[in-house]
Amino acid sequence: MVTTWFLIVGLLLILIGLTDTWRREMPVCAAALYLVAGHLIGPEVFGFLDLDLRRDAALLERLTEAAVLVSVFAVGLRLRPPLRDKLWRVPLVMATLTMAVTIALICGAGLVMGLALAPALLLAAALAPTDPVLASDVQVDHEHDRDRLRFSLTAEAGLNDGTAAPFVMLALGLMGLHTLGPWGAQWWRQDLLWPTLGGLALGWGLGFAFSRLVVWLRREREQALGMESFLTLGLIALTYGLALLLQVYGFLAVFAAGLAMRQVERQDTPNGMPVVDDAARLGPDAAAHPQRATAYMAKTVLDFTLDLEKLAEMIVMIVVGTLIRGDAFTPLSIGIALAVCFVARPLAVFATTPRMGLTPGQRRLAAWFGIRGVGSMYYLAFAVAHGASGPQMGVVADAVLVTVVLSVLLHGSSATPVMRLYRRARRHGRSAEG
């Protein structure tokens, strides 16, 4: 299997690299192509790679875990507005209240379709978070992008991969695989409040201290120059390791670490300085520049993380493609997938975002672009690896896989043309106002 894996990944990397410009003009996103490639090499077609969710749950958990870590860190680095900025209102609501309503709706759909409460809740918790990796066209274009829709979708995806975790633990508790305590007291304390708040605080503190230390070393000592890749991986690993040690949510901690790094850069950059362009123009000399060291560090770390993110996206989507079986597309799994994309997400967004500053068109797009992907696969693999089993877990697994496939095809394929029209409409609107 190892030899086959290296050959497949190597060929795909070269193929994608050589055809990147041509591929960008296609209405199909890269993730959809990876899914197709994974299915072709999977057991139902050529049989070059055979993965099974139950047999390989631990491996799948680790692969998807690494992909989510890289992606949430990259999302944090993309978000430059200060935390007191009103732009943060919408994504905070969408990552908490909207997600909770989404979970309730999906869980209700599962119950109606014959699932027991625990499997239905696990299904809902796995499918609730949107994906920070896929459909990059709906994310912020750059660090200074203040478009309310793109900012909201980007920040929501970075946050809700962590905020979905308490509901996964609640579902496992209902299955008897996790202790909830009397009346759920232990769940509130040890699965909701402390892991969430502790994860955010830990990540923020580490990201802030790390950024200040590296910038001080570069400005005062001219040390740690040109080591952005090592520093990035080190910060992600250290933050996640401490989060596991302290039993707080690592995805939230890593997201907060990336966010803190970007906030340090914003505080250190003089008003009006074109951060990205200047850092790129000055090149490596900016690494120790008194006014540009943080900007250069943030830019180079983000560039490296985005490359890692693309690699992680490819690997995970190939894996998902190999897991897809024809018999997974049952009326039940297709019905759940359609309910998630066309009912639960739109209803949750429209119910929780009135008077939030979004235009009617932006609310419609926010309701549509709730792409599911790597995060959903992580929570599914996590649950299976931690003992979730039973006849209805097959239904849950099929529904998650089918929903991811449908979401990648629908949302990923529509992202480029729809967002192109959206940008054009926004430019025309600003021109008319001017």
Image (cartoon, rainbow, N blue to C red):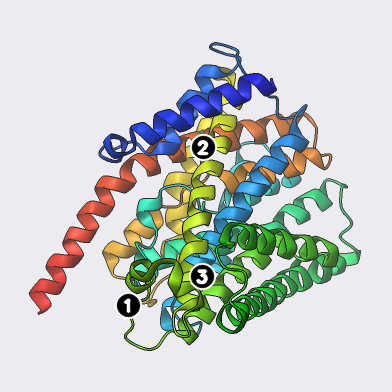
- Where residue 314 is drawn, which disc sits there? 2
Residue at the farthest bottom position: 271
Q: Nearer the viewer, mark 1 or mark 2?
A: 1
Whether tag 1 and tag 2 are in contact, CB under 8 A, the answer is: no
If you read the primary sequence from the N terminus, does the residue marked by circle 1 or circle 3 appear first? 1
Residue 285 can be seen, yes or no: yes
Vertical side of 336 occupied by 280: above or below: below
Amino acid type assigned to the residue bearing label 1 in the image:
Pro
Whether tag 1 and tag 3 are in contact, CB under 8 A, the answer is: no
Distance from Cα at disc 1 to Cα at disc 3: 15 Å
Q: Which quarter of the figure is the C terminus placed in?
A: bottom left
| Residue 32 drawn at (x, y percent) | 43, 34
The residue lying at 37 percent from left, 71 percent from top is 282
| Residue 299 drawn at (x, y percent) | 45, 66
Amino acid type assigned to the residue bearing label 3 in the image:
Met
- Where residue 297 is drawn, which disc sits there? 3
The residue lying at 49 percent from left, 43 percent from top is 339
The residue lying at 61 percent from left, 71 percent from top is 256
Q: Element type at marker 3?
A: helix
| Residue 2 drawn at (x, y percent) | 69, 23
- Residue 85 lies in what quarter of the image? bottom left
- Looking at the picture, tell me which residue is in the foreground, 125 or 55: 55
Amino acid type assigned to the residue bearing label 2 in the image:
Met
- Where residue 274 is drawn, which disc sits there? 1
If you read the primary sequence from the N terminus, does the residue marked by circle 1 or circle 2 appear first? 1
On screen, residue 401 versus residue 84, left or right, reads: right
Distance from Cα at disc 1 to Cα at disc 2: 33 Å
